[in-house]
Amino acid sequence: MTLSAEDTIANRISRVLAERIITGMLEPGAKLRQDHIAEEFGTSHVPVREAFRRLEAQGLAVSEARRGVRVASFSRAEVQEVALMRSVLEGLALRHSAPHLTTFILDQAEAAARAGDAATNIEEWDEANRRFHKLLLAPCNMPRLLAQISDLHAAGSRFLFATRRAAWTPRVDTDHRAILDHLRKGMIDQAVITLERHVKRIGQQPMQVASGANRATYAIQG
């Protein structure tokens, strides 16, 4: 197997495992077994280990001495860290993308905002929300910055799916409307301030654990 082929397989494995972690199919603390994953994908351990490294870089997995690789758990502090990083990085991206936002792009973002408001389940809402943010930020033309923001969105989706799936209810996001209104009027500073505040909103909700007890859980709401 060539190096490029191994890299392609590692990409596929990391993408599939990331999706399972983000959607909650793989729960926090679950062990990622090299043998089982290599067998599932019909490959050696080399691309599996590379996939694990990529998941660790995304904050989706952790490697523990003598315990192997596990799905990363998350605490209130971790949720707050992701929210703060998103706030800073998305504010930077919007400031650079705003001069390049056309009426067509803003109309697409408005359609994404409407789709989020009309979503009937959490997956539809998350997809629409991520599309809204991506449309507004992509014109900054800073690929490394956008890649980092994408990873943070993935982490935020994971927090949301893990803690809100059963209790999710539709809601209208007034921040999205305000951001678009500011951008249409050329009020870039106000749009950036609203976006930065928007992505730092963290919701708290009790969730019943296996023991039957309730514990507080946290998720980014923007």
Image (cartoon, grey):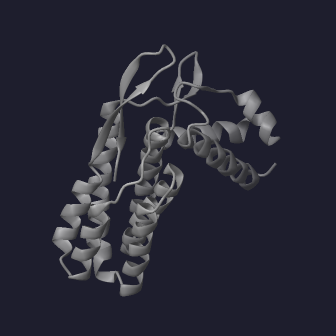
Vertical placement of residue 70 versus 127, above or below: above
Viewer-side residue, 50 vs 199: 199
Which residue extends farthest bottom? 103
Q: Residue at x 70, y 42 (%)?
A: 47
Question: Would you say residue 22 is visible in this rendering?
Answer: yes
| Of 27 and 62, the residue lying toward us | 27
Q: Nearer the viewer, residue 115 or 105?
A: 115
At which x and y percent is residue 154?
48, 49
Residue at coordinates 40% horizontally, 80% vertically from top-left?
107
Q: Quadrant of residue 46?
A: top right
Q: x%, y% of residue 105?
A: 41, 80
Q: Residue at x 46, y 47 (%)?
A: 157
Question: Which residue corresponds to the image point at 56% horizontal and 37% vertical from the top-left?
Answer: 24
Compared with 119, 16 (above or below) is above
Left or right position of 183 against 43: left
Residue 197: image location, x then y, percent = 22, 55
Q: Position of residue 183 (x, y in %)?
A: 25, 77
